[in-house]
């Protein structure tokens, strides 16, 4: 029960990291006042009245709906979006002033190093913590005010603990603390005075106990320390949320990098990779079982190799090779039946990292440039230069298909869409029917190469706002929708993915299919997509 409660607190922290700046921006611009006044508003009309970028305003309002502060409705046939007030709206909006200090802290921290503890942002953190303690004494006694107030307090706490946890986790300091029965701040940090004050904040929150200047983990503190990486992906997008008002009401391209090779502005990529690695390890165990089954079959029924699209730093391709080598029949036959490994990425830095990792591991592989949106060119490249048919390989991808570059679909066969997502491209609102059509064309292009061995994919999904609102504390759906919506990524519901794939002749293998959590508000799926047998 206690772990469940702590996990619920973690999810609420993630909710807060994205909700606070959105709520603050919409209050500042008067959007929420208008919604309260009219009770029901049309998204396009609202965007026009406030000179907003409709795509990002759509994402923002859907985030508030996922927190239960509004009702959000998409007309399946026209794509029109209607926003309605509900019983919580007026009371919740009246409490949004509580977000101001954490948004000020977010803005201030952008002027300092994302990995170091520096005095100016820390003093602001202290002030926010003291304010949090005072606010916690004023929780209303009646409902629903009490629940709303506690929800916003948890959102604020996300800003107190989220970036701090990630800094300590990335630096490996939590591991060092745990190895000691107890410790003094000066043992681990050169600025021990400032660090001691930080530990006092965490002690106030019940994460440590202090005795004679020595600190020791509590069970609660150890729970959060072990899960520091769970905050990593959302915290990595804080550069986006510092610019949220500009994205919604100003220059939609404010974070767009125009020069090749320049560092991304919307996300801390190193932090994102670190957070993703910690969060995704559980899914890989399921994928391993599928790979073991495939490569334990008679040799004539096995793929000739594996192609990892979006190979990143090569770690996943290396892992797949080791699983096949050590745990399958094919692993005993590599001399007679070599494994053709291909790492593909759009990013030249990723290709260099993959080559380096595989050379170090003494794994023979082809590492080539490729675009997920152009499988035909990839197939031609493999055939011409390596005498290999793309259809003879098992394709694997992890959290990649939703991050394809947007292209207007050539044909929208059906104006209806069953998705409730909010989608944008450079601030422009995308109709859900167009996103479905784009996804259909994407998989249609891949379908000829996936008929035999298929695509083994781990994918991220959105959840209907009313489901997310009913399950606050059980899902990170709000955070996923916000981080991906404002960075032009296209996460659809599991049902929509399956429907689109079936329309182009790719059948999900339901014996392999898994969803996480195994509920109607699942945000992650594992699928093996291939032609019908």
Image (tube, grey):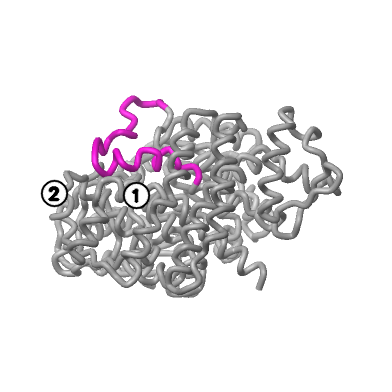
Residue 228, percent across and down? 62, 50
Residue at 86%, 44% in the rendered image: 212
Tell me the SS state at disc 2: helix
Residue 183, located in which quarter of the rendered image?
Answer: top right
Residue 80, percent across and down? 16, 63
Residue 494, percent across and down? 38, 67
Residue at 49%, 64% in the rendered image: 475
Picture disc at residue 233: none
Picture disc at residue 489: 1
Q: Which callout, 1 or 2, points to the residue nearer the camera?
A: 2
Vertical comparison of 419 with 207: above or below: below
Region in magenta: 235-262
Vertical comparison of 33 with 270: above or below: below
Quarter containing the C terminus = bottom left
Q: Nearer the viewer, residue 407 or 40?
A: 40
Residue 426, percent across and down? 25, 42
Picture disc at residue 48: 2
Inspect the magenta stretch and tell me whether residue 454 lies in it: no
Q: How would you rate the neighbour count of disc 2 (Cα within 10 Å): few for under 14, some for 14-19, many for 20 or more?
A: few
Q: How would you rate the neighbour count of disc 1 (Cα within 10 Å): few for under 14, some for 14-19, many for 20 or more?
A: many
Q: Earlier in the sequence, mark 1 or mark 2?
A: 2
Residue at 33%, 25% in the rendered image: 259
Lateral position of residue 62 relative to residue 280, left or right: left
Residue 531 shows up from this direction = no
Vertical comparison of 260 with 46: above or below: above
Residue at 61%, 39% in the rendered image: 167
């Amino acid at each position: 029960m206690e772990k469940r409660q702590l996990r619920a607190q973690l999810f609420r922290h993630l909710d807060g990291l994205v909700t606070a700046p959105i709520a603050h921006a919409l209050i500042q611009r008067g959007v929420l006042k208008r919604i309260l006044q009219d009770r029901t508003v049309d998204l396009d009309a609202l965007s026009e009245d406030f000179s907003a970028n409709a795509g990002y305003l759509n994402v923002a309002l859907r985030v508030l709906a996922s927190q239960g502060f509004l009702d959000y409705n998409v007309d399946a046939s026209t794509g029109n979006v209607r926003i309605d007030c509900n019983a919580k709206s007026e009371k919740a909006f009246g409490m949004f002033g509580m977000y101001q200090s954490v948004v000020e802290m977010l803005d201030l921290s952008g002027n300092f190093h994302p990995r170091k503890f520096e005095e100016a942002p820390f003093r602001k953190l202290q002030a926010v913590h003291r304010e949090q303690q005072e606010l916690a004494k004023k929780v209303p006694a009646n409902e629903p005010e009490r629940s709303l107030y506690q929800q916003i307090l948890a959102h604020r706490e996300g800003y107190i603990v989220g970036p701090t946890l990630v800094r300590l986790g990335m630096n490996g300091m939590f591991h060092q603390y745990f190895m000691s029965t107890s410790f003094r701040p000066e043992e681990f940090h050169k600025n021990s005075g400032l660090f001691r004050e930080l530990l006092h904040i965490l002690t106030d929150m019940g994460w440590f106990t202090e005795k004679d200047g020595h600190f020791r983990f509590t069970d609660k503190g150890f729970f959060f320390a072990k899960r520091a990486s769970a905050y990593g992906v959302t915290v990595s997008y804080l550069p986006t949320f510092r610019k949220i008002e500009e994205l919604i009401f100003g220059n939609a391209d404010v974070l767009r990098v125009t020069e090749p090779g320049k560092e991304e502005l919307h996300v801390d990529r190193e932090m994102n990779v670190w957070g993703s690695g910690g969060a995704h390890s559980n899914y890989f165990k399921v994928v391993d079982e599928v790979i073991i089954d495939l490569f334990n079959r008679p040799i004539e029924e096995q793929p000739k190799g594996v192609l990892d699209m979006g190979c990143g730093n090569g770690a996943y391709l290396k892992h797949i090779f080791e699983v096949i080598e050590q745990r399958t029949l094919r692993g005993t036959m590599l001399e007679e039946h070599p494994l053709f490994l291909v790492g593909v990425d759009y990013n030249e830095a990723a290709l260099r990292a993959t080559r380096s990792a595989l050379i170090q591991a003494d794994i023979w592989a082809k590492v080539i440039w490729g675009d997920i949106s152009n499988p035909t060119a990839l197939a031609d490249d493999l055939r011409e230069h390596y005498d290999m048919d793309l259809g003879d390989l098992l394709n694997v991808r992890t959290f990649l298909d939703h991050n394809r570059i947007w292209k207007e679909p050539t044909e929208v066969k059906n104006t209806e869409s069953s998705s409730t997502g909010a989608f944008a491209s450079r601030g422009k609102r995308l109709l859900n029917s167009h996103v479905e059509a784009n996804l259909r064309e994407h998989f249609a292009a891949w379908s000829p190469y996936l008929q035999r061995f298929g695509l083994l994919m781990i994918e991220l999904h959105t959840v209907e706002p009313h489901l997310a609102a009913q399950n606050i504390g059980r899902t990170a759906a709000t955070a996923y929708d916000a981080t991906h919506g404002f960075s032009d990524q296209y996460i659809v519901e599991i049902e929509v993915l399956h429907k689109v794939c079936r329309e182009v002749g790719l059948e999900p293998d339901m014996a392999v299919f898994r969803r996480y959590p195994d509920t109607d508000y699942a945000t992650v799926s594992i699928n093996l997509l291939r032609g019908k047998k």
